[in-house]
Amino acid sequence: MEETLNLEDILEVIKKNILMIAIMMLWFGCIAAYATFSLMTPQYVAKTQILVSQAQNAEAINNQDIQASLQLINTYRDIIKSPTVLDEVVSNLELQESSSAISNKIEVTNQNQSQVLTVTVTDESAQRAEYIANEVATVFQNTVPEVMNVDNVSVLAAADVGENPSPVSPQPMINIAIGLILGLLTGLGFAFLRTFMDKRIQTEEDVEKHLDLPVLGTVPTFKK
């Protein structure tokens, strides 16, 4: 006869194993908290915005100028993360990292049909992230006229992390919550696995359920 679990059976399994499930949740939560506060290095973010517009010597703005600027966005995104820009940034700031390592810390994005490029720098130091973001914007602005023969880039907003910046990662509450959820799922998994693997008949109800026989009597256990 095929065995199925109804809601009552599920609740009974959880009730019998509630202590083990709670211990698993607490254990995984503690592991997540330890990893968050002891093993993960805080990361800070600094952002600067760069405006790609028509050439500064243009007398008027028209739709063709805007479309041309939008088409240059992808090219400018590549230039920002190129060795041409980043090598100079490393040199100017006297950084100990290579330009390729700095490139991995930089993300360049823009909203759809937007002429504004956002340069986001993630670093272990908030102040260093700010310095790198602003230096990237400055070097890029100076490089574009030499590389593209057009002067249509300006810094819209410089990076400023403030006096008391907060790290963007790790996020303790989220990590601990994930740990608790994993502990809960693991505990439930073990509880149901143990229930399905345990084929012993321990109670009168088990006799009636598995053997489909009525219980006529029981032999009590006597203490010696």
Image (tube, rainbow, N blue to C red):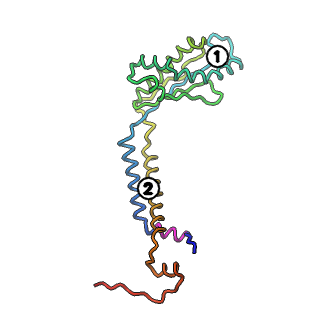
Name the residue rendered at 47%, 22% in the picture: 134
Magenta-highlighted residues: 7-14
- In the displayed structure, 139 sits above or below 216; it is above
Q: Position of residue 62 (x, y in %)?
A: 71, 17
**79 lies left or right of 218:** right
CA separation in Å, label 1 and label 2: 56 Å
Name the residue rendered at 38%, 50% in the picture: 31
Q: Quadrant of residue 23?
A: bottom left
Q: Position of residue 65 (x, y in %)?
A: 68, 17
The secondary structure making up most of the magenta span is helix
Which is more toward the observer, 51 or 204?
A: 204
Q: Say if mark 1 contacts mark 2, CB within 8 Å.
A: no
Q: Quadrant of the C terminus?
A: bottom left
- Residue furthest to the right in view is 63
Q: Which residue is mark 1?
A: 54
Q: Which residue is mark 2?
A: 183
Which is more toward the observer, 198 or 147?
A: 198
Name the residue rendered at 46%, 53% in the picture: 182
Q: Nearer the viewer, mark 1 or mark 2?
A: 2
**63 lies left or right of 138:** right
Q: Amino acid at mark 1?
A: Gln
Name the residue rendered at 36%, 47% in the picture: 34
Mark 1 secondary-structure assignment: loop
Q: Residues within 10 Å of mark 2 (few under 14, many from 20)?
A: many
Q: Position of residue 14 (x, y in %)?
A: 47, 66
